[in-house]
Every structure is written in C-alpha cells, then in structure tokens.
Amino acid sequence: MGMSKNEILVLLTHQWCDWEASYAIAVANSFSDYVVKTIAIDDLPKTSMGGIKAGIDYTIENYQAFDNLAMVILPGGLSWEENDYDEIKKFVKRLTEIKIPIAAICGATYFLCKHGFLDNVKHTGDSFELFQSAEGYKGENLYVSAQVVVDGGFITANETGAVEFAYEIFKLLKVDSDEEMKQWFDNFKNGAVR
C-alpha cells in the first residue's frame, strides 16, 4: 500500500487573511497525519493583515512533491484583487490537471473566478456582483449564495465562512471520524456553551 498523501500547502500572498484558513490548518497539522507547509511566488516572508510574518517553505517554481500533495488552501487577503499572479494561475492550472483539491476563501475565490477556474463548477464568493465585474467570468449560472460550496475539486467560501470552510476541508481530508468532525463544527459554529 502506497503512502497516503499527507502534505497540505497554504498559498500565502501579501497581506493574507490570518483567520480564514487558521481553523483548518491548525486542526489538520496538529491532530491528524497531515503536515501543513507554506508556499508562495517567492521565498520572502509574507506579512498577514494582522501583521504576522510567516516564513515560506516552498516557492511555486521549485515545488515538485505533487505525489504527496493532499490539498492546496488559498486564504483571502488584500492583494488578490489588484494582482494577476500569473505564477499562481499556472500553479492552480497544474493542480486542476492532476486533480489536487483546491480550497479558496474570500479574495482567493475572486482570483479563481477572474481566471476562469470557476466557470464550470458550482462556487461561491464574497458577492455575486463582485464576480460579475470580473472580465470574462462565465460562471454566473453556477454561482451559489452560500457560506461554502464544494464541487468539482474546489471548495469555495465567503469571507465569513471560515468555520464552514474548515469543516468541508476536514471532511474532504477525513481528518477525524464523521462524529468528531460534526461535534467540532457544532462547537465552533454555535459555541460550546449556549
């Protein structure tokens, strides 16, 4: 039996959103057999919206370990809208070709939309109007107004959906039993005391 894929990449950009992937990556990295690593277009530390500097484990250019890659997570951030990030576009295209799941939230969903990745899968984002403003977007009839949508190898979520986003990531990666994951979701969504 081959080794199961156990690396999760978090793709960081300038002014990435601290909280949007944090539930997902903390649980996966600490309480499962998955290992979380960071990747970016270069190896300079990326400063989050909260001013936290994160070191970069891999650059897109030198990443080769696709056989061991379970998922790539794209947190939102303030630089997705004004940048085309051609390197990231090529990287995502490669991921879709080799069927690696991609989880994107907030501004990162807009990036995917802008580059046509969501034209043929059900998806969501921060607003339908924002997506409609993206030149060349052809996915209007597949846009779903929801906290999170899972379809065709993509998990997409709006900026308020971090808990739902994490839950769908956990289910896809099978980080724990269905019962434990349900309990986690209920606690973090509704509070442990209520």
Image (cartoon, grey):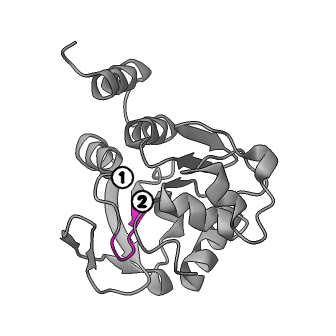
The type of residue carrying mark 1 is Ala
Residue at mark 2 to residue at mark 1: CA–CA distance: 6 Å
Q: Residue at x 35, y 45 (%)?
A: 24
Judge whether residue 98 can be spotted in this image.
Answer: no
Residues marked 2 and 1 touching at CB (< 8 Å):
yes
Q: Residue at x 32, y 58 (%)?
A: 36
Q: Is residue 58 magenta?
A: no
Residue 174, image x, y percentages? 45, 35
Q: Which mark is residue 79?
A: none
Q: 127 and 52: which one is in front? A: 127
Dot 1 crowding, Cα within 10 Å, few <14, some 14–19, many 20+? many
Q: Residue at x 43, y 22 (%)?
A: 178
Q: As displayed, is residue 113 above or below residue 150?
A: below
**Mark 1, residue position:** 21
- Tell me: 143 left or right of 68: right
Dot 2 crowding, Cα within 10 Å, few <14, some 14–19, many 20+? many
Mark 2 residue element: loop
Residue 135, image x, y percentages? 74, 72
Q: 56 and 83: which one is in front? A: 83
Q: As displayed, is residue 188 above or below residue 38?
A: above
Q: Residue at x 40, y 59 (%)?
A: 7
Residue 149, image x, y percentages? 60, 40
- Tell me: 172 left or right of 29: right
Quadrant location, the C terminus: top left
Q: As displayed, is residue 174 above or below residue 44?
A: above
- The span picked out in magenta is 8-15
**Mark 2, residue position:** 75
